[in-house]
Amino acid sequence: MILKDFHIHTNFCDGKNTPEEMVLKAIELKMQELGFSAHSHTFFDESYCMQKEDIQKYKDEILSLKEKYKDKIKIYCGIEMDFFSDMDTSDFDYTIGSVHYLKVNGKYYTVDSGKEKFYNLVNECYNGDFYACVEDYFDTVSKVAEKLNPKIIGHFDLITKYNEGYEFFDEKNPRYVSSYKKAIDKLVKYNIPFEINMGGMSKGYKTHAYPSYDILKYIFEKGGKVVLSSDAHTKDTIMYKFEEYEKKVKEIGFEI
């Protein structure tokens, strides 16, 4: 079983537990490696991310935990870097490259901070055309590797967070399929793994991980790689459903 998790959040951003509480839970789970990935600072929205004045404190605390628990678990200090973030990531152990916003006419709009906000985004910026919004989203995601040079591509189809039962758009629609395939075709050339992210499930929004099974199959067909990520915001969701999804991705054909 995979005993590594590189996408977790603490009370340095929008997580609930302290870094040490997360480490102690990881040790309890007999994990081998744990990567912290605080949300990078976004100047246009500070409601969920790490504050600028806390960045050095975050680095110092993770470094202290690395030393304190070095005989029990390997710890990394990473960052989940938003596409529109203004942070320097050069001295972090790794980065996750993610898209949480769309920039339209100079304004930033969140895609994952509430169903009503998402609905309003589509109506205000795309004249109610959900597929136009999806196309813009995947076009932005397609540029993550080039712009951010991350070690992991974060929750590839986060745009589906509120789309259970295809409430807003049909994920089999040719426009949707074409848009995600174009993004994957571009991203796989960088040989960066896509994360299989359990956050939507653990928070009750989704019945499956990001990305969808169809997208995972296409990533495999194109020679892409994957890594399991919990996107845990509490200690109790570290490695959430890892055993189940390790089996699923191996059935598709991935080596993991």
Image (cartoon, grey):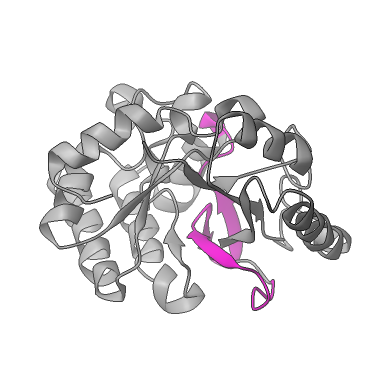
* Residue with the most extreme front position: 71
* Range of residues picked out in magenta: 87-116
Nearer to me, 16 or 4: 4
Vertical relation: 79 (above or below) 1: below
The quarter holding residue 30 reads top right
| Total count of labels | 0
Residue 165 left/right relative to 232: left
Can residue 233 be seen from the camera position used here? no
Which quadrant, please, contains the N terminus?
top left
Vertical relation: 149 (above or below) 214: below
Residue 100 magenta: yes
* Residue 58 pos. (x, y %): 80, 57
Please name the residue shown 42% across and 48% down the image: 155
Residue 75 left/right relative to 176: right
Please name the residue shown 74% across and 63% down the image: 43
Please name the residue shown 23% across and 40% down the image: 249
* Residue 98 pos. (x, y %): 49, 57
Please name the residue shown 31% across and 27% down the image: 244
Vertical relation: 26 (above or below) 176: above
Residue 126 left/right relative to 202: left
The quarter holding residue 94 reads bottom right
Nearer to me, 15 or 170: 15
* Residue 28 pos. (x, y %): 62, 29
Can residue 187 be seen from the camera position used here? yes
Nearer to me, 3 or 183: 3
Residue 41 magenta: no
* Residue 60 pos. (x, y %): 83, 61
